[in-house]
Amino acid sequence: MNFHSPDYVVFLLLVVALYYLLAQRGWQNALLVGASALFYGYVHPWFLWLLAAVVGAAYLATRVMEARPALGRLALWGAALVCMGLLGVFKYFNFFLDNINGLLRSGGLGELPWTLQLLLPVGISFYTFQAVAYVADVYAGRARAEHNPINLALFLSFFPQLVAGPIERAHHLLRQVQTPRRFRFENLVEGTTLALWGFFKKLVIGDNMAVVANKIFLLGDPGPALLSVGVLAFGVQIYADFSGYTDIARGSARLLGFDLCENFRHPYIAQSPADFWRRWHISLSQWVRDYIYFPLGGSRVSRPREVANVLITMFLCGLWHGAAWNFAVWGLYHGLLIVAYRLLEWRGMVFSGGSVWLQGLRVLVMFFLVHVGWALFREPDLAWLVHNANPFVPHAHAEPRVAAYLLLLTCLYALPLYLHAWLDRWDWQPRVAWRISDWMLRTGFATACLAASLVLGATVTTDFIYFQF
Amino acid sequence: MSRGAWIGVAAFFVVVATVPAWITQQVAGEVSKQPFDPVPERLISGVRPGYVFLGNSMLDTRIIPGVFAEQAGAPAMIFSIPGVMSAAWYLQLKHQIAAADPAPAMVFVLFRDTHLTRPQLRTGGRYAKWLESLRPDEDEELAAVLAGSAEHLPWYARAWGLPQWWLGWLYPADKALRRGQHWLPEVGLRLLGRDEAKRKELRVRLDRTFGRDRFRDASGADVMPSASEAVYDFNGSVGWSFLPLMLSEAESAGIRLCFVRVRTRRAAMGLPEPEALSQYMRDLKTWLTRRKACFVDMKFNPAISLDWYSDGDHIRPSRREAYTRLFYDAVRDQLP
């Protein structure tokens, strides 16, 4: 079920109404597990078997860790194997097979006969990572094993964040699952406002920018000017799309009294690659930091080893986004950026503070570097990208005036995102203190978001980009 | 919570729910029906083709009319609209093809799996705009099929659809977006071009820049992974589809209809189809042949291999001529 379908609106209203009719937390949790199953199995009921396998593996492993600590390591590896095995089979099997077959063909050795024709289950990258984090946290003593399977099932399958995150941790979401939640009108108002802002970002900004970016990336020979606008439009699209999804998820959860973690903090005003990853897909960057980078030794090792740790972590982070080499290259590119900035830091350069002009310059440089990365992320055909980025060869479809117009259009659509970042510097968010000014601001904001989504959106909506990951 | 706070919360929801509804209805109210497109009817009357093809991108990425005409010995024309399905084919047949004088002897409809008996597919959003341009006025039969196909659904499906219908009525976004989507692009045009002549020139440049001839091969993928294979009961759904109306329109105009199931990428990958779908296709064939329409199944034609596909279920341009020849071989026995 898609967040931006009428199905979801009806579904959410029904779930919220039923949820608050049930007074006891246990019944509320059971209702949410059922609702999550309906949400996830709505189109493909067999997806539920995968989710059940992940929940079962996490439950069994953590109970074994608690009951028989000596078997803890085995249980950890067992659960990780189930989760990563499912991810590997459904997401990466054919990718690796294609690459092996490519190598075999180039050596004149024919091809392996196997191939899997499987549909990639939506959200599998998110809930498997959440399950692995939970099991690892229990193993490391950072979290306690949940005894109630309903609670654990809810933690791992909570529908607002099931298919595209944020990737939650036990100390944050599971704790909320375990504690009573009471009805608060503030939650309804805040949740509605947040979700409507998410709809606005997705439907008005993301979908309209998708039209611009998709058309430019379809051209045979657009040239550097149009390509640059296409990349910029894609940068706006992916941010509006994914952060819009997150806001709808957080808003939906808030309606039910849950607080999901923040996933974005104005990433395009980052001043360094490390700063960017503290602002972009925060729950994933924290996951790779805690469960890949730190176990590899992090920065508490020799400098060459630290560099290798960064590159390995970012390569895997890139590959997480999709079973294709352009995602791996994108991850590696960000790894190289982090390493380059770190090398400069080791030589005494500082990438925070300073005058406004200096900060602005850093933001511009980082903005450019991030968008070079988006070009690698968006376009799998590297030869096409290199050819069209080259200003010294003629380009058949180059149209400077069209590029100027589309650049202007991209800026117009991106304006609310920058306005939001600018307002956030002054902590403008209205409080639900029921002062008349706060009430007017929040009501006006939510009303404008909904009205604009209904009138200014694109006529063809696209799936959320991160659903495919 | 204080009394004032209660009022504040209630007012929040009332304002947030009603003001956007009012705005959307105002904007939607000013959207007029797309004018009827009479060109296909005139073209058919002028060119007098023996064969006309209907379909979506499954058609225009497969058939070259000139190649088919050369083999069949009579002019052929294609009228494809990207993405549309049976509702549009019915309207095209009724208002544009059967209305031509003389009408063609045969009309081919290229479709995927169960799409012929799923009348509501692709009738909203931008497709609604297409449908409007295919009928001079309101089409009662169209409305009746769309409503009727909903009526025969089980009670729980209808109950689920009721609040959605109500939301659609309260917030007619489909129509409002058709008008509103041009506003910001128009602001951009006005900022760049002060006078109408300059804006017009920019519009022309935009259209030229993004003409289909400039797109790369792998463009405009129309992939419906396994959705088109979703199994339906043919005999239970045909009465609520456009098929009976299409056959009746064709019969009145002396046209023979020929429905051709195309080979999808999944079939070319060697994936078997569910037995229930095979049964559905047998029922469809029986139903059509009893009514003197023809049915040709190209789904399992082994000559069309995976390397023929560019993206999704589309055939790459370099294979279209060969595809047209294969198509001719497949339907040759059915030609008048």
Image (cartoon, coloured by chain):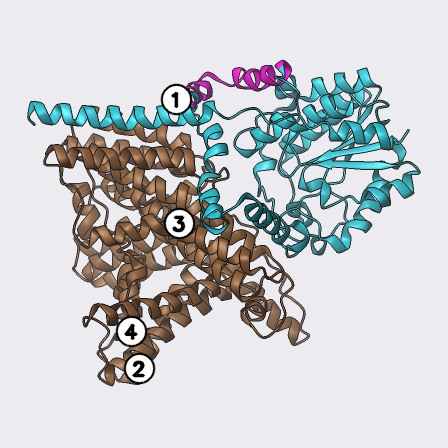
Question: Taking B188 as reference, is A184 left or right?
Answer: left
Q: Residue drawn at (57%, 15%), measured in percent from left and top?
A: B148
- Magenta span of residues: B140-164
Query: In the rendered image, which residue does mark 2 sit on?
Result: A305
- Image: B227 above or below A362: above
Q: Is B143 a magenta residue?
A: yes
Q: Earlier in the sequence, mark 4 or mark 2?
A: 4
Tell whether B34 sits left or right of B95: left
What chain is colored brown?
A
What residue did someone put label 1 on? B170
The reply to whether the magenta stretch includes residue A116 is no
Task: Using the image as rendered, state which of residue A82 and residue A439 is in the foreground.
Answer: A439
The answer to whether dots 1 and 3 both sit on one chain is no
Say which amino acid is labelled 1.
Leu
Residue on which the image places disc 3: A412
Look at 18% across and 33% down and name the residue there. Answer: A440
* Residue drawn at (46%, 69%) of the image: A329
Residue for badge 4: A296
Foreground: disc 1 or disc 2: 1
Residue A47 can be seen in this image: yes
Q: Is residue B229 left or right of residue A303?
A: right
Inspect the image, locate mark 3, and give the three-letter code of the amino acid beneath it: Leu
> Same chain for the residues at labels 3 and 4, yes or no?
yes
Q: Colour of chain B?
A: cyan
CB under 8 Å between callouts 4 and 2?
A: no
Mark 4 lies on a secondary structure that is: loop
Cα–Cα gap, marks 2 and 3? 45 Å
Residue A359: x, y in percent? 24, 69
